[in-house]
Amino acid sequence: MKLKLFFVTFITLLCAAQVHAAKIRVVATLTDLADITRNVGGENVEVFSLATGIEDTHGVPMKPSFVPKMNQADLLVLVGFGCEHAFLPALLEASKNPRIQYGKAGYVDCSAGIAPLEVPKSTDHSEGDVHPYGNPHYMLDPVLAKTAVQNIYNALVAIAPEHEADFTRNRDAYLAKLDAKIAEWQEALKPLKGAKFVSYHEHWPYFAKRFGLEYFGTIELKPGVDPTPHHITELVATMKAEHVPIVVREPQFPEKVPTLIAKQAGATLIKLPIMPGGVPNTDTYIEMMDYIVHTLAGTVSK
Amino acid sequence: MRLKKCILILSVSLCASGLRAQETNEVVQLKEQMQQMQKGFEKREQDMETRFEKKIAAQDAVIESLKEKLAFMPTNPPPPSVAIVPPAETVTPEKLKELNEKVDSVVEAQKKTLMSEFNPAIGLVGETVFGYRSKGSDQTGSDRPGGFDIWQRSVELNVAASVDPFAKGWVVANASADSATGEASFGIEEAALQTTSLPGNVSLTAGRFFGEFGRLSNIHDHELPFVNRPLALDQFIGGESRTDGLQLNWLPPIDHYVSLTLGVGDQLGGDSPKNNPGTYRAFNELNVWGRVSTYFDLTPNWQLEAGVSGLLNPQTQDRGGVLVQPNGSTQTERARRLAGVDMKVSYVPLANNQFRSFTWGTEVLFSDNRYLFDPNGSLNPANATPGLDGDEFTGNVGSLGLYSYVNYKWSRQWSAGFLFDWVQNAQNHSDETFAYSPFITFALSHWNQLRLQYTRTEPSSISGMKPDDAIYLQWAWIIGAHSHGWQQR
């Protein structure tokens, strides 16, 4: 009897392991891509995100505990355009996983097919920590996020064609939801058409372009370089002269300088996440975009 | 007479008015001609402008249509029988403008990538140390002079790229100014190849590289969190863990991070002399080292890394030559044995780790070298006829050393910390040295950094050296490509 019980338990565990093993193991660098992968992959994927949402997209800590996850991954989903240059190359080296290295099928660069904005004229550090391929923060434009959805879908279908029907159904459902939301967001931001705003880091050019806002400048002197007192004074003066009503602080940056600038320029300071989880109740990409749009729209009534 | 005068005046007036009228007519005619000419010019100018605008518009239309075709063109052209279906939606000027911007940015991005095709990543690191030491080198044992000292410690050229689908390669060439002559000696610090696609979670590194031993011996000077390499690493390893060798690293396929390394080389330590550089070297005269390291997430923001390292050179013939002690006796190394335990506790807040962090790192080293002792110094090469005279014997010297440091970062630019050093001489554990070094770092940017450090060094009296106070200002900068590898994290 005991032997029978042992066998039953053993076989159950084995089956459970098989079911577990059958899932596609995906490591996503940021939480927006992790959320989209979960939506498209459904039950067939097991997704781990390197970021939790509150990190700087360029400064996710290189934790050795990420290495086993990446070692066992079938797919690595990343933003691209050099967004993860500060932490991903070393993690990839340590992962010793040939399936997800650059150029391999498991290396899913979601920027494929996206035309970059702000491609620098020269890749020189006098311009700060420039991204040679252009600004990588395209995920803040929900229309461009649809390209990322398609790229993730393509990679999933390539690795598990037997689940193509599931992936197609999931993708279509997600895109339909996203399209409906995009229309809603565009409507909500209509009153802000042409409104100027500044942010700490250059996260918002794609967003501004999509929703018709005017991206006025950044608090950072250059990408990755803290503002100097002269830069702050100059920024405040031009903000006053140009009547810039909004200062955006991304959660991973200190509050002191944006608060000071907003106060001196007579602008409204708002905190906006740059990926899901950046502020409470923004666990999914759609929830995050909802939060961004409604917080911005709320500045009109102030 | 009056009548005659009147007629005369009248006739003169008539003639004058006739002449004026004739002149007026000519001016009017001239004016008319000029106006006609002006009109003609204006008309011609207008015609030309219209024609030019039409031409430009036509050329623009051709360019736009070509761009449009290009945008919708598949990678492989379709067979001739397949007709290209024009896009159904109406092309508005806004859409054309957007399309133009897209094409331009893609072309711009491609220019950037194509230009560097097959070229390796190249970076240069410069490091200057401005120093003041209260004692001269004869009293500190340092290779740097006392008093004021400006030292271009390194100019380091880094070149790295994939070799092929199976390996990557890198070279680090360093020019460092000699303390005596001031001339820069150019040397190859690293020139190695590492496999990238071996099965079984294994990678192999071959060539000249920094062997994986302990926490800070395998990183370059400018990447240290303080100005100088800890005394224990200088004493037992010989500065940086440079080797000409082969190293195998294995990542066990388990859910917890563990890294295992095994290496073999003809030396370990940049300033450590090679073993038996004579005519024949047996396998047991090579250095063999190994390391096991692991990691724990204590909380999402707190991390713990720990490792154990070991180094064995079973037989050394004349590594470093005959070492003459202050009392005149000599020691000649016969075997090199070194063990180390290291750990690092870090606070790296997920939300703003660029602006705030804390690190506590410690490494303890135990050296247990075997020596040939010669109490009366008959082996001293300075003697007229150096040689064995029967009083020699072999024995081990167990010496300990450690360093421990903390570093706190409170903004993107500022951090400060303290380094404690303690080391026993590898040949004589009674000879101890302590050092205390507070330091403060100002990083103007990621590529431009200044560090001010004070160091109080206290050697024991048997060493014959004197306590020393030193102040250093280190200025390190980077140009070109610079990425942090896994070891430098």
Image (cartoon, helix red, strand yellow):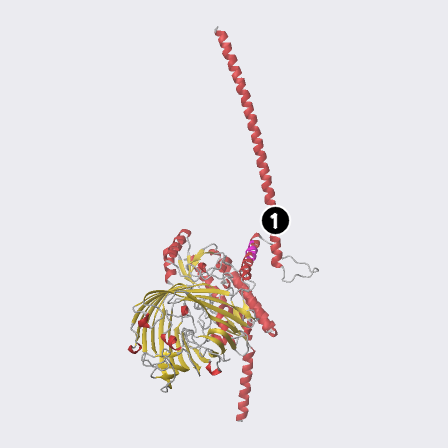
Q: Residue at x 56, y 24 (%)?
A: B26
- Label 1: element kind: helix
Q: Residue furthest top?
A: B1
Q: Is residue B363 above or below residue A190?
A: below
| Chain letter of the residue beneath label 1 in the structure image | B
Left or right of residue B458: residue A114: right
Residue B102 magenta-highlighted = yes
Q: Nearer the viewer, residue B170 or B375?
A: B375
Q: Magenta span has B413?
A: no
| Depicted A244 relative to depicted B270: above or below | above
Residue B376 appears at what percent x and percent y?
A: 33, 83
Query: Picture coordinates of residue B450 (x, y %)?
Result: 37, 64
Q: Residue furthest bottom?
A: A1
Q: Mark 1 is on which residue type?
A: Gln
- x, y (%) of residue B368? 39, 83
Q: Percent x, y for residue B432?
A: 32, 78
| The N terminus of chain A sits in image quarter | bottom right
Q: Main secondary structure of the magenta part?
A: helix
Identify the magenta region. B97-103
Q: Note whether residue A84 is visible.
A: no
Check the image and report above or below for A294 versus B388. above
**Local crowd size for mark 1, using a 10 Å CA cut-off: few (<14), some (14–19), many (≥20):** few
**Which residue is labeled 1 in the image?**
B59
Pick the front one: B234 or A13: B234
In-front residue for pair B451/A9: B451
